[in-house]
Amino acid sequence: MVYLLGVVLFALAILISVSLHEAGHMLTAKGFGMKVTRYFVGFGPTLWSFKRGETEYGVKGIPLGGFCKIVGMTPQDDDVDPADEPRVMWRYPVWKRTIVMSAGSITHFALALGALWVMAVSVGLPNPKFPTTEEAFKAEPAVIALAPCVVVENTARACQAGDPASPAAQAQLRDGDRITSVNGKPISTWGQMLDVVRAAKPGPATVEYVRDGQRATATLDLAAVQRPPLNDPKGATSAVSAMGVALEPSTPRMVQYGPVGAFGATADFTGQMAVGTVHALQRIPQKVPALLTAITGGERDADTPISVVGASRLGGEAVANNAWFVFFMLFVNLNFFIGVFNLLPLLPLDGGHIAIAWFERARSWVYARIGRPDPGRVDYLKLMPITYAVILIGGAFTLLTVTADVVNPITLFSR
């Protein structure tokens, strides 16, 4: 039940975001004097509506987005009343049209930035100095965090009945103990500890450690587990020894900020998201085979794209596991991604309309400088084949991700 509540909450958050996206278009268009005739949340049959001024507001039966109707977005629109001709959108200066068309993405960015600032002040943001690479983790001091058990097979899952208890926990080691030697071999980093422990035989081992500045010694029974080589995580597994511990990094994972400092932290984190979003967009074509593999029964790559369905399922998992930070970070990343994606210079995306508006402006400027007559507006009808191709590819990709998220979803928490 809690999981379903989380799914509904995340889906509702997405619907509100998209509705605010359309509200951004509507409010800026109205502010410049353009005529907006309709603003609806959802698609399909109208459930409820009312008219205020010249705009009809309402809710439709399929809650999968929203829309607003701005009169005369292109010169080819054939449903413009002659009385509205002076107020059609395409007649307005290019900078005004740019603001109106980018207002949706700006709304998504504002939602993401606002949520990040609140998180920075309340629970903190990921520490940019926290180790993220395997090499950085191996260079950390060998400070341990006890695992509740040892998972013998090579799989990432939660402890289950029948799993051996953690040898380190049985030997009365504690979280925060720093390992200094195993079987007399000195250790200073986590990577050294892994090498020494894995090379040792299962069974009794002598461990020296430091706790609260005091040195101590413990004897524990190393467990036998199946693991791949440290330098080849996807390689063949073999029998090695394990203590039943994880690394407790010396650098805090999260950093909490004051109201003023949170602005800088939000900006820094947004820069990281921007780079990550660009890389994610570049990798989308490469991930299509992995999505097909997931649909046909193969293992789902956690780095493959997800749809709104997949994001809502992850939101449900986060709520079910009381991981609200994950829930809101999903919300932030999704809004930021939608904001960036919507600005791509492709029709029918907002970025396509912006690109055409500035192309028209640049072309008119060039023609004026060379003494030729203004060529006028771009004929959108000639661009329809490209627009249809983008819609077809986008629709196919959406169907692919939704299918993968239904038959083989990504999970963040072990069940």
Image: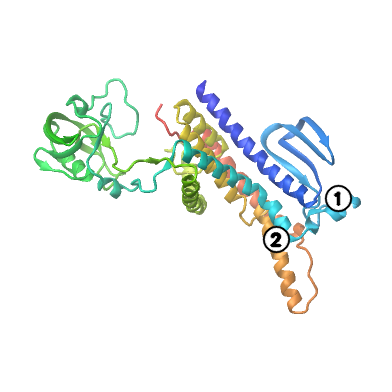
| Quadrant, the C terminus | top left
Front-most of 14 and 222? 14
Q: Position of residue 224 (x, y in %)?
A: 19, 32
**Residue 154 position (above or below residue 284):** above
Q: Position of residue 112 (x, y in %)?
A: 55, 43
Q: Quadrant of residue 241?
A: top left
Q: Is residue 349 visible?
A: no
Going from N to C along the chain, the mark reached first, 2 or 1, is: 1
For this orientation, the residue located farthest to the right is 83
* Residue 381: assigned label: none
Image disc number at residue 356 = 2
Q: CA distance from mark 2 to mark 1?
A: 21 Å
Disc 1 marks a residue whose amino acid type is Val
119 in relation to 378, above or below: above
Question: Residue 319: x percent and y percent?
Answer: 49, 28
Q: Dot 1 corresponds to which residue?
A: 80
